[in-house]
């Protein structure tokens, strides 16, 4: 295995992706490779704090909270060949409830919920490219966590199939996880003190 030498305007598939090795992490969106920057300390602290609360809530339940790096192949169908799959993302946190879609390479299909934590290098990508991708895939709940403003924007799928703004939470709020009945995230335990 080797690290990829990515050509501009080249289209890649999951088959290509499986052959890449090295410290770099990538996402594929419609065959285009996106290099993922290493997350910052604050990003990792926030991710761990949310993940910990989700893990505590989900203990003994069927759903799971999975933190990155974890490959999610949003549009892959049963028995689809890797050379036909051109979209793989690594959400910061995924909530999955259908373990039959888990394999040794990640998750096939759309999780119950996805959480992305903004960083300077990913903010535009998470708010536009991945937002539209998740909407197209049929995601029901999407959280965008903004460390700079210590806020969480929650989007839910409406009857027309669009992800629409549902709630904005600040750092002292308790955020409702709509995908998990009875689950709430205490944001004062998520955002580090300024």
Image (cartoon, rainbow, N blue to C red):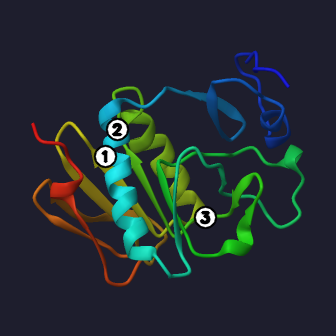
Quarter holding residue 153: bottom left
Q: Residue at x 90, y 53 (%)?
A: 81
The residues bearing labels 2 and 1 have C-alpha atoms spaced at a distance of: 5 Å
Q: Position of residue 30 (x, y in %)?
A: 68, 41
Mark 2 lies on a secondary structure that is helix
Quadrant of the frame with the N terminus: top right
Mark 1 lies on a secondary structure that is helix
Q: Position of residue 117 (x, y in %)?
A: 37, 44
Label 2 sits on residue: 43
**Tag nearer the camera, 2 or 3:** 2
Quadrant of the frame with the C terminus: top left
Residue 110 got which mark? Answer: 3
Q: Position of residue 82 (x, y in %)?
A: 86, 48
**Tag nearer the camera, 1 or 3:** 1
Q: Residues within 10 Å of mark 3 (few under 14, many from 20)?
A: many
Q: Is residue 97 above or below residue 68?
A: below
Query: Is any part of residue 58 visible from this angle?
Result: yes
Mark 3 or mark 1, which is nearer the start of the sequence? 1
For the residues bearing labels 2 and 1, Cβ distance under 8 angstroms: yes
Q: Residue at x 52, y 56 (%)?
A: 134
Quarter holding residue 119: top left
Q: Position of residue 59 (x, y in %)?
A: 46, 76
For the residues bearing labels 2 and 3, Cβ distance under 8 angstroms: no
Mark 3 lies on a secondary structure that is loop
The residues bearing labels 1 and 3 have C-alpha atoms spaced at a distance of: 23 Å
Q: Residue at x 37, y 84 (%)?
A: 181
Q: Is residue 28 above or below residue 77?
A: above
Residue 46 got which mark? Answer: 1
Count of numbered circles in the view: 3
- Quick check: 80 left or right of 27? right
């Amino acid at each position: 295995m080797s690290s990829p030498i990515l050509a501009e305007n080249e289209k890649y598939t999951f088959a290509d992706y499986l052959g890449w090795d090295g410290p770099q992490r990538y996402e594929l969106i419609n065959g285009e490779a996106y290099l993922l920057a290493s997350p910052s300390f604050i990003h990792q602290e926030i991710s761990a704090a949310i993940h910990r609360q989700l893990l505590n809530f989900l203990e003994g339940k069927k759903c799971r909270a999975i933190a990155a790096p974890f490959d999610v192949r949003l549009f892959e169908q049963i028995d689809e060949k890797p050379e036909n799959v051109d979209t793989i993302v690594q959400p910061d946190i995924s909530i999955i409830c259908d373990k039959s879609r888990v394999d040794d390479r990640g998750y096939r299909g759309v999780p119950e919920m996805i959480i992305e934590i903004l960083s300077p290098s990913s903010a535009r990508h998470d708010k536009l490219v991945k937002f539209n991708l998740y909407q197209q895939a049929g995601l029901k709940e999407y959280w965008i966590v903004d460390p700079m403003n210590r806020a969480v924007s929650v989007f839910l799928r409406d009857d027309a199939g669009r992800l629409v703004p549902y709630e904005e939470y600040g750092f002292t709020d308790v955020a409702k996880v709509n995908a998990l009945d009875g689950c709430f995230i205490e944001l004062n335990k998520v955002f580090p003190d300024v």
